[in-house]
């Protein structure tokens, strides 16, 4: 009598044969020449120029003729894989300081072009628009997103987690202009290299995607269309990109930004016994320095957040704390590095489940100062933050307000890329009173 848990030899061998057959068929499909060619990404060429183009949106500067136009765009919506219904040309130039993009968007019905957004970082999906994604490490893990419409609106986003995570509070320093004409509309971009983070290379190849949206046709066309299965937000995805070639050797460029501030004011307490006017003088400085093209040092003393965009007012009728996105400049550099946990939220869903939430730093007391190092070193991604808040004494200078929380915050994030889309890493958080 057979044991109830013992498999029959014949059945076991047949299962092994089925598994081997499946593996062989899958491997032969992946390694077949036809499939390899189908998977090879399209490429687009950048051309070096000694004369920068005039960024006025008209695309009539003769220097643009140095670059050959790219016109092969394909639909993601409404008919996946179909050629674009309207012609689009894009030209790419660069010099020592900037990367330039010139768009010519032909339209058979130019009077029906939709353009009604001008506020910085307004989402432009409901306008005619063009978009650029730059994956400067060419690892399909993240990148930089830039977009404009026929009015020249500016929309930029910092992407991480293959484009699933979007940091729209990131505001780079760049230029764009656009103009409408009888044939459609044109747009020009000038993106400084020092606003991007990239690795040194003798012959740089970046990931890139270029897209155009025509809302009246519900049409989205791409240089490398993301599959419809990606769903909402596919225009941000970096998993499927084209290649940007022709940049040549990329070497370190000096990156130094110093932002000092001086605030003079006075205050008077009329309920006090002696309501004399008290004058106040506050000073501080923020410094950003590029240690390497991909590694950045941020230093801040008595950080001033007075110019930061205010949070939207919300009425909280639940027993849970409200979640507000980070908008402070000191914490925005390399913000995606410190994400650990659920990186995004669905419509109507709960807030992200993040182990590190930077908005808790400086919530109960002003930030005296802090330092941060963030960026990539080969396959490693590093993020290190240290911040001091509250009641403090340094070099004989002290803050006598005992109601403030005296605390030192320290955050370490380290990741290593493994395989094509995976990482392994750790996060260490410390708070000392």
Image (cartoon, rainbow, N blue to C red):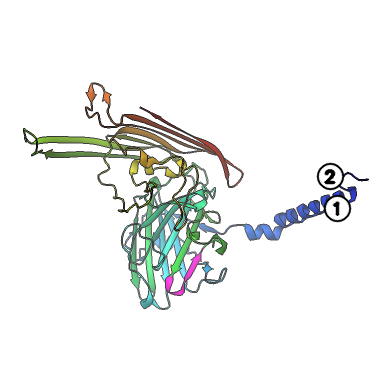
Q: Mark 2 points at which residue?
A: 5
The percent position of residue 64, horizontal first and vertical second, equals 40, 62
The residue depicted at 51 percent of the width and 58 percent of the height is 44
The percent position of residue 402, horizontal first and vertical second, equals 24, 28
Task: Indicate whether 94 appears above or below 115.
Answer: above
Name the element at disc 2: loop
How far apart are labels 2 and 1 at the CA level? 18 Å
Q: For the N terminus, which image quadrant? A: top right
Circle 2 residues within 10 Å: few <14, some 14–19, many ≥20: few
**Residue at the far top in the pictured view:** 396
Circle 1 residues within 10 Å: few <14, some 14–19, many ≥20: few
Magenta stretch containing residue 280, yes or no? no
Task: Indicate whether 412 appears above or below 114.
Answer: above
The answer to whether residue 233 is left or right of residue 398 is right
The residue depicted at 33 percent of the width and 59 percent of the height is 55
Q: Nearer the viewer, residue 374 or 46?
A: 374
User: What label does residue 186 carry, if any?
Assistant: none
Q: Mark 1 points at which residue?
A: 14
Name the element at disc 1: helix
The percent position of residue 270, horizontal first and vertical second, equals 8, 39
In which quadrant of the rendered view does residue 127 lie?
bottom left
Q: What stretch is highlighted in magenta?
A: 215-222
Sequence-earlier tag: 2 or 1: 2
């Amino acid at each position: 009598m057979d044991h109830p848990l013992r498999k029959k030899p014949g059945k076991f061998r047949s299962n092994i044969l089925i598994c081997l057959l499946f593996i062989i068929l899958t491997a032969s499909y992946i390694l077949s020449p036809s499939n390899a060619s189908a998977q090879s990404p399209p490429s687009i060429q950048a051309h070096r120029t000694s004369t920068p183009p005039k960024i006025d949106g008209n695309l009539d500067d003769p220097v643009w003729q140095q670059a050959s136009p790219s016109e092969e765009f394909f639909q993601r919506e409404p008919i996946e894989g179909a050629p674009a219904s309207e012609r689009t040309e894009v030209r790419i130039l660069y010099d020592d300081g900037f990367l330039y993009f010139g768009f010519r968007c032909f339209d058979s019905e130019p009077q029906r072009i939709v353009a009604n957004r001008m506020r910085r970082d307004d989402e432009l999906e409901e306008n005619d628009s063009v978009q650029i994604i730059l994956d400067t490490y060419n690892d399909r893990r993240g990148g930089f997103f830039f977009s404009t419409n026929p009015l020249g609106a500016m929309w930029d986003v910092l992407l991480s987690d293959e484009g699933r995570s979007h940091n729209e509070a990131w505001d780079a320093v760049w230029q764009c202009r656009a103009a409408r004409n009888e044939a459609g509309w044109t747009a020009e971009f000038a993106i400084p290299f020092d606003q991007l983070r990239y690795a040194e290379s003798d012959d740089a190849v970046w990931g890139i995607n270029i897209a155009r949206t025509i809302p009246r046709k519900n049409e989205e066309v791409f240089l490398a269309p993301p599959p419809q299965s990606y769903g909402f937000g596919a225009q941000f995805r970096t998993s499927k990109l084209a290649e940007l070639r022709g940049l040549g050797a990329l070497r370190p460029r000096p990156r130094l930004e110093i932002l000092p501030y001086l605030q003079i004011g006075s205050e008077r307490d009329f309920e006090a016994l002696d309501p004399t006017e008290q004058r106040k003088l506050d000073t501080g400085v923020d410094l950003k320095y590029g240690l390497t093209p991909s590694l950045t040092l941020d230093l801040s003393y008595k950080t001033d957040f007075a110019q930061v965009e205010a949070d939207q007012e919300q009425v909280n009728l639940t027993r849970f704390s409200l979640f507000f996105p980070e908008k402070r400049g000191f914490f925005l550099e390399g913000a995606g590095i410190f994400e650990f946990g659920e990186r995004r939220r669905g419509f109507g869903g709960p807030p992200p489940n993040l182990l590190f939430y930077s908005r808790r730093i400086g919530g109960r007391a002003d930030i005296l100062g802090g330092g941060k190092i963030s960026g990539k070193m080969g396959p490693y991604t590093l993020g290190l933050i240290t911040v001091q808040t509250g009641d403090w004494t340094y070099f004989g200078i002290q803050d006598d307000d005992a109601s403030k929380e005296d605390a030192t915050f320290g955050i370490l994030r380290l990741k290593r890329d493994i395989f094509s889309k995976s990482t392994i890493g750790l996060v260490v958080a410390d708070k000392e009173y």
